[in-house]
Amino acid sequence: MASAAAPDQSPRPVRFGILGCASIARKLARAMLLAPGAAVAAVGSRSEEKARLFAADNGLDAATTRLHGSYEALLDDPDVDAVYLPLPTSLHVRWAAAAAARGKHVLLEKPTALCAADLDAILAACDAAGVQFMDSTMWMHHPRTAKMRELVDGKEAIGDIKVINSVFSFRANEDFLQNDIRVKPDLDALGSLGDVGWYCIRAILWAVDYELPKTVIALRDPVKNRAGVLLACGATLYWADGKTATFNCSFLTNLTMDVTLVGTNGTLHLTDFVIPYEEKSAEFCVASKSNFAKLHTRWDPLPSKHVVTTDLPQEALMVQEFARLVQNIRDAGGKPEGKWPAITRKTQVVLDAVKASIDKGSEPIEVAS
Amino acid sequence: MASAAAPDQSPRPVRFGILGCASIARKLARAMLLAPGAAVAAVGSRSEEKARLFAADNGLDAATTRLHGSYEALLDDPDVDAVYLPLPTSLHVRWAAAAAARGKHVLLEKPTALCAADLDAILAACDAAGVQFMDSTMWMHHPRTAKMRELVDGKEAIGDIKVINSVFSFRANEDFLQNDIRVKPDLDALGSLGDVGWYCIRAILWAVDYELPKTVIALRDPVKNRAGVLLACGATLYWADGKTATFNCSFLTNLTMDVTLVGTNGTLHLTDFVIPYEEKSAEFCVASKSNFAKLHTRWDPLPSKHVVTTDLPQEALMVQEFARLVQNIRDAGGKPEGKWPAITRKTQVVLDAVKASIDKGSEPIEVAS
């Protein structure tokens, strides 16, 4: 224990306010408890009772967690540094911009907005207020992702990536398909494209170091519910230099989280890219300079499996990184890190193009930069 | 050892003639030595010397293997039951039809023809002569394929397949890209589409139990060499019920052999579908009714790995199956098995549609039945 004469040198934790008690917020509340440099200061919901239940259910300290019965009240809380915002997508532009305007740093659930214009309003508000923006795409923060980045950037193992495939689907049950916010046109109008396609698009952009494709063409015959919300769709992305990427995203097929990168020198496979099979350890496979043994009877060399361990789950690492950036601004006069909003915007721009192609019956759409 | 008084009851081996000494024929010669019910009776090449060298290099018995200095001479050999034909694709229609016309059963390398019309000429000749036809798509005969078939047909593990992805590529060296028959417009005009795309199309059709897609749309920007031969291309296939499949086939990226099936109940992955990593054992992974543990922190249940062993390599199993069918015709008055030419034709018909879409700048092409 530090004595009174030796002041604690570690920075003050970032005080998070959780704005909305969506199911995904439970995972983030746990992450905030686990992440160094973070603390849950407040929960805001449409009623104080819902906030209280959420806090109790998620192990938040009743003595130190303030409970707010409205989103406004949470944003007015002067002892909140940053908000985590898991509201339905249609509400993001209003509440994320409002949070930024009150000087709160913004950790925003994906999809970040219904369209790039809405996202731009959010980013402009963050920019004007000098607050940090980050979207809540957790897998970006897993050390496996850093390891793969190193491998891809090294060029030797994979070479020039030419083909990318990604699939993210899960099999929604009847209750989800009838009642979940992600199938409601007034709440999450982007459906499976926003909820799971977001990850595929991000993975594809990640793989090419965020170079935007030139053209996007949606796969034909997307599946929509009666309200017109996408339940399953996909697209092919084309770059000027001939790279192509195809993704499928669906609420109608078994849980699948694939990314495959095929390069001139090597091939990378992972099949659990959004949420690893296990929390403490994650794998990916690389086949590099693959060839055959004599008479093509077997492969030589064989692909190799890479295992990356982590003490903290990826969502806690995300919170930790966000908190570090906030501390740098709050305590050291630093500026917001521009990398995160830039990545978000590119993801949203491609998502917009896919949506436009779907809406136009799979016509090619040029990607705006 | 069987005594003279106890005649051997096992059927006489099928006497194969190898028509052309292509590199792939070396693998098949070994398969014929390994496969029960098969024997290499003769080798035919453009010169007797080439045939002699091939026989010597591949461990064929000099005393019992007849060497022919022309393809015609091999077809005239009355002690040849069946020919294996690994010639360049442009020569298939001439020599496969000629073989059938002389009553030889035909095991034909893939791609079987430059177009479905040529294949139809071959199949008509086989039909008229009452001989067995089979294409040399080896992985079809691996016990892993039978195991996966069982799983897919069972419906419970995978459910209704909605999305299929396949990639087959290998990184050709400069010598291949300059000199191999597979980049020559007069020899193998289908390039990567015929050589490796064939397998992707077959795998996709296999997955849907050979239901033909309704429409095919080539991916944009295929890569061709100066002579116009395809080096890298791909397509998306659409079925009337909403299933889609995408494949990529290339001579320009690392060796990759992926098939992914995404169904309503489960997901199947394999990454070495054409030639397994190891000769005696092959794997595939199935994730079925996948879900998450609490808070979506990990998967529960995890995918399972299936391992299938085989004493004989897949190409020997193919030769064995072909020999069995030939013996049934030759020795027991049976009829040719229609399943194999039917599968071949569907593969070729889809390949034709992809080629047509490529030639028309990725226009949708309706698949002829």
Image (cartoon, coloured by chain):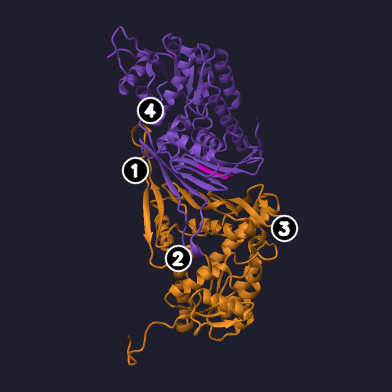
Chain colours: A purple, B orange
Q: Tell me the amino acid under the disc marked 2.
A: Gln
Q: Are marks 3 and 2 on the same chain?
A: yes
Residue at (49% x, 36% y) in the render? A196
CA distance separating discs 4 and 1: 19 Å
Q: Tell me the amino acid under the disc marked 1.
A: Pro
Q: Tell me the amino acid under the disc marked 3.
A: Ala
Identify the mark nearer the N-term, 3 or 2: 3
CA distance separating discs 1 and 2: 32 Å
CA distance separating discs 2 and 4: 48 Å
> Height in image: A171 above or below A77?
below
Q: What stretch of residues is rendered in magenta?
A: A160-166
Across and down, in percent, residue B56 comes to 52, 77
Residue at (41% x, 16% y) in the render? A14
Residue A161 shown in magenta = yes
Q: Give SS at disc 1.
A: loop
Residue under label 3:
B227
Are there few (<14), some (14-19), or many (20+) residues within 10 Å of tag 3? Answer: few
Q: Are marks 4 and 3 on the same chain?
A: no
Residue at (38% x, 27% y) in the render? A27
Residue under label 1:
B301
Residue under label 2:
B314
- Residue A27, labelled with which disc? 4
Q: Nearer the viewer, mark 2 or mark 4?
A: 2
Across and down, in percent, residue B103 comes to 57, 82
